[in-house]
Image (tube, rainbow, N blue to C red):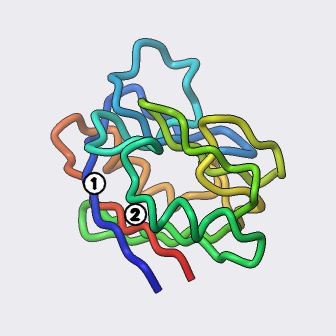
Amino acid sequence: MFKIVFYAWGDPLISALHRTTMEITKHDIKSPKGDCIIATRSELALKDLPEEFKERAKDEKARIGLIIEAGGISEEVWGKGHPKLSFESEHDMIIRKTNFICKRTLMIGANKAAIELNRLLVEVLKNKNTKVRFTLIIE
């Protein structure tokens, strides 16, 4: 097992209503249209992840987990890796329930999208002063 811990922040424009994805970004949210965003001002984007993680995630048998912790609430999301994951994005990480892959994709086949997150957690994420701890796991 390989773990990476990093931090990001909440934002008042977080709605977490997207039905197939969730996104962590280094940017601030500029519009409520970004309904997949769950955290902003992230310390890391895909390109920043350690090479060992990237290599392991390119195995179709890789199980990738993301633990989201904020305001005393914890949520786990699990998906899988794929050989076509490129980890090129300098700004974002997208978790997808589908099998769509682009340079912003962290994992595919996830068991949750933004809309399925605990709504109490989403309320906490709507505060710009909320520091969000992420633990990225690969098995």
Query: In the rendered view, does 137 fall on the left or right side of 70?
Result: right
Circle 2 residues within 10 Å: few <14, some 14–19, many ≥20 = many
Depicted 69 relative to depicted 123: above or below: below
Q: CA distance from mark 2 to mark 1?
A: 7 Å
Which label belongs to residue 132?
A: 1
Q: Which residue type does callout 2 highlight?
A: Ile
Residue 46: x, y in percent?
Answer: 47, 44
Q: Which corner quadrant of the image does residue 90 belong to? A: top left
Query: In the rendered view, does 86 fall on the left or right side of 61?
Result: left
Query: In the rendered view, does 3 fall on the left or right side of 133?
Result: right
Identify the secondary structure beneath mark 1.
strand
Depicted 13 relative to depicted 98: above or below: above
Residue 89: x, y in percent?
Answer: 51, 33
Q: Which corner quadrant of the image does residue 69 belong to? A: bottom left
Furthest toward the right, the residue is: 99
Residue 107: x, y in percent?
Answer: 65, 57
Dots 2, 1 in contact, CB < 8 A: yes
Residue that appears at 16% across and 40% down: 129
Residue that appears at 45% across and 67% down: 52
Q: Which residue type does callout 1 highlight?
A: Val
Depicted 11 relative to depicted 97: above or below: above
Pick the residue in front: 137 or 22.
137
Label 2 belongs to which residue? Answer: 68
Pick the residue in front: 18 or 77.
77
Q: Earlier in the sequence, mark 2 or mark 1?
A: 2
Identify the secondary structure beneath mark 2.
strand
Furthest toward the left, the residue is: 129
Query: In the rendered view, does 45 fall on the left or right side of 95?
Result: left
Q: Quadrant location of the C terminus?
A: bottom right
Residue that appears at 27% across and 54% down: 132
